[in-house]
Image: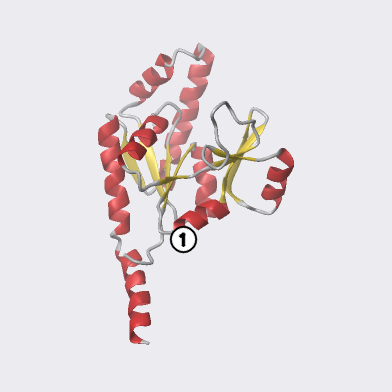
């Protein structure tokens, strides 16, 4: 509908649940969605483009942005900052485009505080056994790290109540289909549509 604002969707879930794979498949099938571009203080890798892969900024610039509350969420990993800039998200939503954020659980809870009107989707493993296998099968982690990741995953699953929807990632395509159904249903919500109609009716009656 003309004048409809986009919706911010937040996809989150425990480490090893397959967020990246689901998001990548979703974007291949739904080119209308906009991926939220993060700000980072790390150096660009070969082939990365500023404003496409990331907004590359200096630590001083990011410190100023943090002070001025310009992030929906931010975190520090291995000495570098990563954050979701409010202005970019707001601008994209105002253009009527949906914005999609794939993020860790801690970051999603920050978004909830700063952007409660977002739609929060929790990607859930088919079982804890399956999650354990996925973490182990990465083959990159020691036994201690696997145990820590599983403990962390358990804590993150306990935070599920903060989300609007839960999608089980048993098969990537099925998970993508469920997320697309959520996107459609959110756009059909009465309060979103009635707001647009009231604006349109108001302008037609004047």
Placement of 185 over or under 54, stated as above or below: below
How many discs appear?
Answer: 1
| Residue at 65 percent of width and 53 percent of height | 69
Which residue, as the protein is rendered here, is positioned at the far bottom? 206
How many neighbours does mark 1 have within 10 angstroms: few (below 14), some (14-19), or many (20 or more)? some
Residue 107, how many percent across, how many down? 53, 41
Residue 173 vs residue 75, the one in the foreground: 173
Q: Secondary structure at mark 1?
A: helix
Colour mapping used in the image: secondary structure
Residue 180, how many percent across, how many down? 29, 45
Placement of 64 over or under 177, stated as above or below: below
| Residue at 37 percent of width and 64 percent of height | 4
Residue 185, how many percent across, how many down? 28, 54
The N terminus, quarter of image: bottom left
Placement of 1 over or under 56, stated as above or below: below
Which residue, as the protein is rendered here, is positioned at the far right? 60
Question: Could you tell whether 145 is left or right of 191 in the image?
Answer: right
Residue 161, how many percent across, how many down? 41, 45
Residue 146 vs residue 2, the one in the foreground: 2
Question: Could you tell whether 5 is left or right of 142 in the image?
Answer: left
Residue identifier under label 1: 94
The C terminus, quarter of image: bottom left
| Residue at 36 percent of width and 70 percent of height | 195
| Residue at 40 percent of width and 33 percent of height | 19
């Amino acid at each position: 509908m003309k004048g409809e604002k986009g919706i911010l969707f937040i996809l989150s879930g425990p480490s090893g649940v397959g967020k990246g794979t689901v998001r990548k498949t979703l974007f291949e099938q739904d080119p209308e969605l906009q991926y939220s571009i993060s700000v980072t203080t790390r150096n660009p890798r070969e082939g990365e483009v500023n404003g496409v892969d990331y907004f590359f900024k200096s630590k001083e610039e990011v410190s100023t942005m943090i002070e001025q509350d310009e992030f929906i969420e931010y975190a520090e990993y291995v000495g570098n900052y990563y954050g979701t800039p409010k202005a970019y998200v707001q601008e994209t939503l105002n253009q009527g485009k949906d914005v999609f954020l794939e993020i860790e659980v801690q970051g999603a809870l920050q978004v909830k505080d700063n952007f409660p009107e977002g739609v929060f989707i929790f990607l859930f493993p088919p079982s804890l056994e399956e999650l354990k296998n996925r973490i182990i099968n990465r083959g990159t982690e020691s036994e201690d790290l696997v145990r820590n990741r599983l403990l962390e995953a358990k804590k993150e699953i306990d935070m599920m109540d903060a989300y609007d929807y839960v999608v089980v990632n048993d098969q990537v395509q099925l998970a993508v289909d469920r997320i697309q159904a959520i996107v459609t249903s959110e756009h059909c919500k009465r309060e979103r549509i009635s707001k647009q109609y009231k604006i349109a009716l108001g302008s037609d009656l004047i």
